[in-house]
Structures are given as C-alpha cells and as structure tokens.
Image: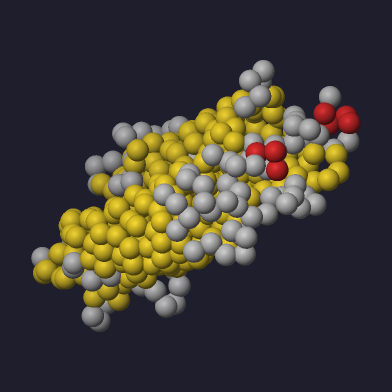
Amino acid sequence: MVGLLGRCWGGDADAQRFYAHFRYSESLPFTRAHDGFGASLGYNLNRYLGAELSFDHYDLHLTLDGVGKVAELGTAIIMPTVRLRYPLLHDTLEPYLTAGVGVAFSQINDRSTRALGRPIESDDVAFAGAVGGGFDYAWADNFQVGLAGKYLMTTSSNTTVSGTNVNSDLNTALLSFSFRLLYPALHPDQEPGAGGDGAYAVYWAVRAGGGAPVHHHVFGQVVEHESNAAIGPTFNQLYGVAFGLNLGPNLGVEMPVGGYEMALAIPGFGTIGEYAVYDLIPRLRFRHPLPNDRLEAYVAGGVGPTYAEFNDRRPITKGLGEIRGKGFGFGGLFGAGLEYFVMKNVSVAGEATYFMDRSHELRIRDVTQSGNLDSVFLNLELKVMLFNSGAKVPSWLTQ
C-alpha cells in the first residue's frame, strides 16, 4: 500500500535478503556506556531466523576514588550473532532477539584535566558475549527504523594508573536508535524517488570519512597532527548526518551536522590536547543526472555557523596554566560529489569538500592566537529518500 506521500507500508518477512543495520546511542542515566555506535551485516535466512556479523563501540568513564573521572575507556566489540525475529501486523512491526560471542578491544582516550600528572595505560583484548533485542518498523519494504537494546559482557580490562594496575569492568547495556536497509527492494515502484519526476523529495543521510587541516600551523605556533583515531598519516576520522530536500531533478538544500578532531602540539614541547571542529553549514546543491539513470553528479556550497572546542588536555601541560578554546564561529564551504542509486530510494556517494573557517581562537595562559581551520573533507555518504510530495516543484526549477 502506498501512502499519500509515496511512502510504502509493510514488508515481506518471508523473503531471503541481505541487510545492513546501523545503531547509535547517547549517554543514558541507566547505562554506563557513552557515545555508542554500531553496525551489522547480515542475511535473513527465513521468516524467523537471521545471521549477522556485528560491531559495537562505546566509551566508559574511568574514575579514581577521591579524584573522579580521569579518562574514557574506549571499547570495540566484534562478534558473529544469531537473530530471531517474529514479524507482526502484516510484517510492518518486527520484534527480535539477538545473541552472540566474539572479542573485545579496549584503549584509553580523552583524558580529563584530573589526569594531569597521572600516566594512564590500557591496551587489552578480551572475550565478549552479548544478548539483546529490539524492534523494527517498516518505513518501506527495504528500510526499517527502530530501537535496539543489547547487554555486552566481557572479561575485565587491565588498566594502569600512575603505575598501579586497575581492573576495569567493561560490561554495559546499550540502548540505540537504529535503521536497517534490506537488499534487494521487493517493490521498487512503490519507493520514493530523488525528485527526478519534479516532486519535492525529503531525505536523510549519514556520512563517514576523513578531515585534514590545510595549514600545519593552525593557531600561530601551535601545530596540528593526526589524532589517535586518524585514517593514515593525514586524515582524521570525520562523521556526520544530514537532512535534505531535493527540489525536482536539479536542485536541493541540505542541513548537516558533522565534524572531526585533530591533535594540537607545541613544537619542542609536545602534544597539548585535541581540538574538535564541527560543520553546521547549510548548503545549496546543484545536481545533474547522468545518462545512466542511477548516477548523479553534483556541486554544493554554503556559508553558516561552525563550532570548535579544545579537549583531552595532556598531562605534560600541567605547567602551562589555562588553555581555552571553545565556541561558535562562522565559515563557508564548497565541494562536489558523485551519487549512485543502489535502489530507487537508497544511494551511496563520494564527496570532496573544501571547508573554510578562520573565526576561532585558542588561548594559552594570557596569549590568544587566531586560528586558520581551513580543511579538506573526503566523505562517503549513505542516503535514504524518506518520502515524496504529491505536489510538483515550479516548472522554472526543472529547466
């Protein structure tokens, strides 16, 4: 059944199909985990049984008695998982249970100012298990949204604080917002398109890639270098999400949220901490469908707000006094990309963007340095068309 906005209701749970499941969880008062995310690749074997390879990452706060939080303990878990499901309401609602065993990796990151003068080390591998469950709601026959819960169990991590061994319990619960893409689509004629027929088309996208400053000296004599989570010797990990609106086949507007983090250092002194840069700039997209009806080239640009903050101050800076750099700024960007529609309502894209921002400052003791945060972003994007309007865009927008 097709909704008024082109939305497809229900699925077909009997079909054997591949799927990708993506999860994100924030800090919650009833869990120990912070900033969790995960993904699974799987296959529905029949109406009730599936198998998948699952990845989860989360942070735990490492605390010391009488001191408080000194760092975060990042944990990554990889495990094969069995998935039992029971489709309901004409396959529109799908509750499920999961269980699996695998391996966990943990390491220290994001030290707090309370860690100044306290060396912390942790790099451990442990066995892990998980049980969980959740439910998915079929927005379209190949796109589901839902909630996913999971309890992760591992052996303790060996962590050293100021030379003293501390056993860190990595067990925690995760509660995540999730979405699932299934391939192939069973009813492609019912899925919303990208606006090629002149309709308004609303979409949602996630991005992952790398960001690298153009200038080595980003704040006067303060230089950048790649963070612990770098991609190779140049690019730092970059993540983001976006909502957008295609105005027919050739134009679009988009509102993103995303960013990356670099390490800052003083030459001859060492790394002083990390600096996060966030892109909040709305952009206008000019699109050009190519002769292959699945491929689309585009250019994009815009001006608007940015945000940046200094964090994860290193212990060696204890004698430097106050280090401050946090707040909103203003910048611009321009870029281009190529988008390929895997299905009528799902696409993947590669994009290169030049980001310009010279509005932020870093203060060390009583000295304030103006910044040059111009950067190059290289992104891969996964986009899902949510619905089309019944109305058409003005004819002059389709010329």
Residue 135, percent from left and from top: 51, 64
Seen from the viewer's position, the closer of residues 223 and 80 is: 80
Furthest residue in direction bottom, as rendered: 66
**In the visual, does 249 lie left or right of 277?**
right
Residue 55, percent from left and from top: 35, 52
Vertical arrangement, residue 313 with respect to residue 379, above or below: below
The quarter of the image holding the C terminus is top right
Residue 397, percent from left and from top: 83, 31
Residue 268, percent from left and from top: 24, 42
Seen from the viewer's position, the closer of residues 335 and 398 is: 398
Vertical arrangement, residue 63 with respect to residue 24, above or below: below
- The answer to whether residue 3 is seen in the rendering is yes
Seen from the viewer's position, the closer of residues 33 and 281 is: 33
**In the visual, does 374 lie left or right of 243?**
left
Q: Residue at x 25, y 47 (%)?
A: 269
Furthest residue in direction right, as rendered: 395
Q: Quadrant of residue 125?
A: bottom left
**In the visual, does 399 lie left or right of 167?**
right
Seen from the viewer's position, the closer of residues 281 and 173 is: 173
Q: Residue at x 57, y 51 (%)?
A: 12
- The answer to whether residue 332 is seen in the rendering is no
Q: Residue at x 28, y 41 (%)?
A: 267
Q: Quadrant of residue 382?
A: top right
Q: How is the image coloured?
A: secondary structure
Vertical arrangement, residue 330 with respect to residue 63, above or below: above
Q: Residue at x 63, y 20 (%)?
A: 292
Across the whole image, how many numbered discs are drawn on residues?
A: 0
